[in-house]
Amino acid sequence: MRTVITCCAQGLRMALLVLLVWQLAVGQAHAFFFGGVSLKDEKKMGRKFDTMIRSNLPLVQDPEVSHYVEGLVRRLVKAIPPQPFTFRSGVILHPQLNAFAVPGGYVYVFTGLIMNLNSEGELAGVLAHELAHVTQRHVATRLERAQVVSIASLLLAVAGIAAGGSGGGALAVGALGAGQSAMLNYSRLDENEADHIGLQYLTAAGYAPASMAGGFKVLRQKSWMSGASVPAYLSTHPDIGDRINGIMARVTGMKESIRNRRTDNSRFLRVQTLLWGRYGDEQAALQRFRGKDALSLMGRGMVHARRNDVVQAARHFDAAVAAAPADPLVLREAGAFHYRKGDMSKAEPLLTRAMQLDPRDYMASFFYARLLDETGRAAQADRYYKDVLRQVPEEADVHEAYARSLGRSGRTGAAYVHMAYSAIYANRRKQAKRYVEEARAKARGAADAPLLKRLEAVYKERKEMWEDD
C-alpha cells in the first residue's frame, strides 16, 4: 500500500491538488452565486473534495491507524445531536500538526498531529472542535457570505495547509492574489463557537474536558519550538492562547467527577508507535523506543529496517515477537519485514498468525496475498486480494497488485478491469481511459461481464466528476 513518497513527488502532487481544487472551486462558485448553500450542495462539495484528497494525497490505509481514527470519530458523533451527514474520516500522511473538516462531514487528520499529541483525549479534543465546524455549518455560512471568492479561497487554503509551510501557502495564495488572504480564516466567532460546542461533544463522549485545552497547548508549544511554518492566514487555529484560557474557564465550572475522568491510551500509543516507526525522524523515533516492551522493540525494528540495517531490524523484530507472541500488530510488522527481505519461510507463519488473531487487518492479508503470488500460489492469493478490496475498494495499489496476479494467471480481461480501477482511483485519467478500453476488448463474455458492468458504472461516475472540474 501507499506509504512513502519523496519530497519532490509530494510537491508535484500537491501542486496538482491545488490546480484541481482551483478548478473545482471555480466550477462550484457559479452554483452558489444566486442562492444559499444547501445541504445537497455541501454533500456534493464534500464528496468531490474527498475524492481529490484521496486521489492526490497519500492517505494512511493501515487498519491499525484508520480503524482507530474512525472509531474515535464515531464515538464523538454518537455524542452529538442527529446530523444530516454521514461522517467519514481519513488520515493524511503529512508532518503538519493539524486536522480539518469540510462540508458534508469529511474529517481529515494529519499524521503529524497524532504523532505529537500526548493522549487520546487531546486528539479527541481537536477532532471535536473540527466536528463542531461541520455541525455549525461554518464553511457553508462563509461561502454564502463571500459567494464566489470564498469558495475558491477556502478550498485552496486547505490545499495550502496540506502542502505545509510557506511554500504551500504561497502556491495557494498565488492562484487568487494575496489580497484575498484575509478570507482564508474562520472568523474568531466561528472558532469560539467550535471550541464551545466541541467541548460539549468531547465531554458528552466521556473524555476529560481539559483534554481539548491540552491538545491546543501542544499545538502552541510545537509552533513556538519549530517556528511559524504555516502563515497565520492559513492557520485553522488562530489565537490559541486566548482560546485555551476560555476553555479552561468553562472546565473549572464542571463537576469534579467530569474533570477527573481517565482515558485508556493503549490504542493511541499503539498507533503512535506505528506512525513513528514508519514515518518519524529516525533518530527521534529511536529515542522514543528505548523501552523493552514489545511495541518499543517493534518500533526499533521498523526504524532499523528503514535504515536498511537488516541485522539490527531482524534482532529487534524477533525480540518483539518473543515478548508478545499473541499481538497481531507485532506479528504483522515482523512478517512484513521478513517478506520484504525475501525470507518467505519466516514471513508466512507470522502473517498467518496475525490474520488469525485479527481478521480485520487487511494489511496482513495484503502482504500474505503478495507472498502467495511470489511463491507460485496465485490461485490461493485471489481470495485474499478480494478480502482486502472489500475493506479498501478504492486503494489503487491493491488493484494494481491484484491485476498483475490475474495477468499471471491468464485472466487478462479481469486484469485490465483492475488496472483500470487502479488508474481511476489514482486519478490517472489517460491511463484510466486506455485500460477501460482494454478491459472492454479483453473481457471474456459472461465470466467477466459483471466485473465490466461495475467498472463502467464507476468510470462513468468518475468521468462526470472530472468533467465537472
Image (cartoon, grey):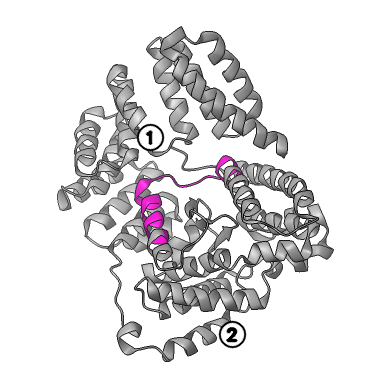
Q: Is residue 66 magenta?
A: yes
Mainly helix, strand or loop, the magenta region? Answer: helix
- In the picture shown, does residue 221 fall above or below 365? below
| Residue at which label 1 appears | 390
Q: Quadrant of residue 76?
A: bottom left
Label 2, label 1: how far apart the Cα atoms are: 46 Å
At 70% from the left and 54% from the top, the residue drawn is 156
Q: Quadrant of residue 54?
A: top right
Residue 127 horizontal/vertical position (percent): 48, 65
Above or below: residue 232 compared with residue 442: below
Left-right relation of 383 to 132: left
Tell me the quarter of the image containing the C terminus. Answer: top right
For residue 456, the mark is: none
Identified at 32% across, 53% down, the residue is: 299
For label 2, the crowd category at 10 Å Cα-Cα, with few meaning under 14, some 14 to 19 and many 20 or more, is few
* Nearer the observer, 267 or 249: 249
- State the extent of the magenta-drawn residues as a range: 52-73
Decide which of 424, 352 is in the foreground and name it: 424
Q: Amino acid at mark 2?
A: Asp
Q: Is residue 307 above or below residue 343?
A: below
Task: Answer with left or right where residue 89 lies relative to residue 431.
Answer: left
Say left or right for 249 vs 432.
left
Mark 1, Cα crowd under 10 Å, few <14 / some 14-19 / many 20+, is few
x%, y% of residue 249? 49, 90
Q: Nearer the viewer, residue 409 or 311?
A: 409
Give the residue type that dot 1 points to: Arg
* Marking on residue 242: 2
Q: Quick check: can you spot residue 431? A: yes
